[in-house]
Image (cartoon, helix red, strand yellow):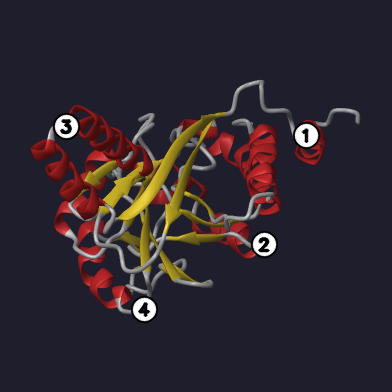
Amino acid sequence: MGGLSRRATFVSREKEGAIPVLLVDAGNIFSGKALSEPSLEPTVRKAELHVKAMERMGYRAAALGEMDLYLGPERLRALDEGSGIRFLSANLTNAGGKPLFKPYLLFDTDPLKVLILGLTPVPKRLPLLESRMAGSLIKDPFETAADMVPRLRKRCDLLIVLSNLGYRGDLRLAREVDGIDIIIGGRDRKFMRKPKIAGSTLITSGYFQGRAVGKLTLSYDGPVRGWVSEEELGFLDKQADAAGERGDQGKLEDLKTRREAARQLTRYRNNMVVLDPSIPDDAHITSMIREYRGEKQ
């Protein structure tokens, strides 16, 4: 079950701290492969369990990934409407161009407004997927973002994209579309212990089948003007201290200038938390899984 019980324990511990927590997912929640007709109903049952577990943890939004689409719009809509988690896709529409799901969500929190936009990849045109999504269109995600982000940027302090485009797609998105602060990626099995900074956009991710949780902590004190890690700032401080002890005045002044410039950027800490056996199972989620499997309590 992708470490659902351990993930619930980890999330619960994080919520005990003073920092507000926003839980999101970048898609392909329900399957990692194409779904044949006989596998649909078992997958729907598992999807219902996943959504209930994620709702209990406090997830707020999830992008719709390519593999999620194999469930079809009606099943996905039932999962969406039956929970407090919103499935997001700005570029998945009906034949008339109307979004099938919410394109974005705006969270009005103190002290900032956070907008989360979802993007779905244009899949390879496989007949099976075309039949499941008959009457639907998946518009170009890059064109969609280029159209929407400038308008949405005016409505928020922090603009986050939940992307199921893969790492290369995320890099392209950061290069081509100005105004995105953070891209949280999915799809690829890339273990991103350290985020990638592309221009003014920070790119990070979770991990395959929820085997690890991406944790990004922000120190927000005004509009994002770029990104710097707490680790990098600490390293600059150590370098400056060492230069001062050596009496290297020229190096010290250079480091002070670099450090002052870095302190004007938005600071972050990032970690990829592996959900290994050191994290105990959550009793309630474990009970839900046993019920799903038909096991005796």
Work out whether residue 45 can be spotted: no
Q: Is residue 88 left or right of residue 229?
A: right
| Residue 150 image-quadrant placement | bottom left
Around disc 4, counting alpha carbons within 10 Å, would you say few (fewer than 14), some (14 to 19), or many (20 or more)?
some
Which of the marked residues, 4 or 1, is nearer the chain's N terminus?
4
**What amino acid does circle 2 point to?**
Gly
Viewer-closest of 123 and 287: 287
> Which element carries disc 1, helix, strand or loop?
helix
| Nearer to the camera, 262 or 72 | 262
Q: Position of residue 139 (x, y in %)?
A: 27, 61
Q: Which residue is mark 4?
A: 155
The Cα–Cα distance between marks 2 and 3, rounded to whole angstroms, is 66 Å
The residue beneath circle 3 is: 247
- Residue at image mark 1: 286
Amino acid at the residue labelled 4? Arg
Q: Select label 2 or label 1 by which is in front.
A: 1
Above or below: residue 261 compared with residue 214: below
Q: Is residue 10 above or below residue 225?
A: above
Could you tell me which secondary element the residue under label 3 belongs to? loop
Q: CA gap, disc 2 to disc 4? A: 28 Å
Q: Nearer the viewer, mark 2 or mark 3?
A: 3
* First-in-chain label (2 vs 1): 2
Expressed as whole percent of the image width and height from the top left, the position of residue 184 reads: 38, 48
The residues bearing labels 4 and 1 have C-alpha atoms spaced at a distance of: 40 Å
| Image quarter of the N terminus | top right
> Mark 3 and mark 1: span between their CA atoms?
60 Å
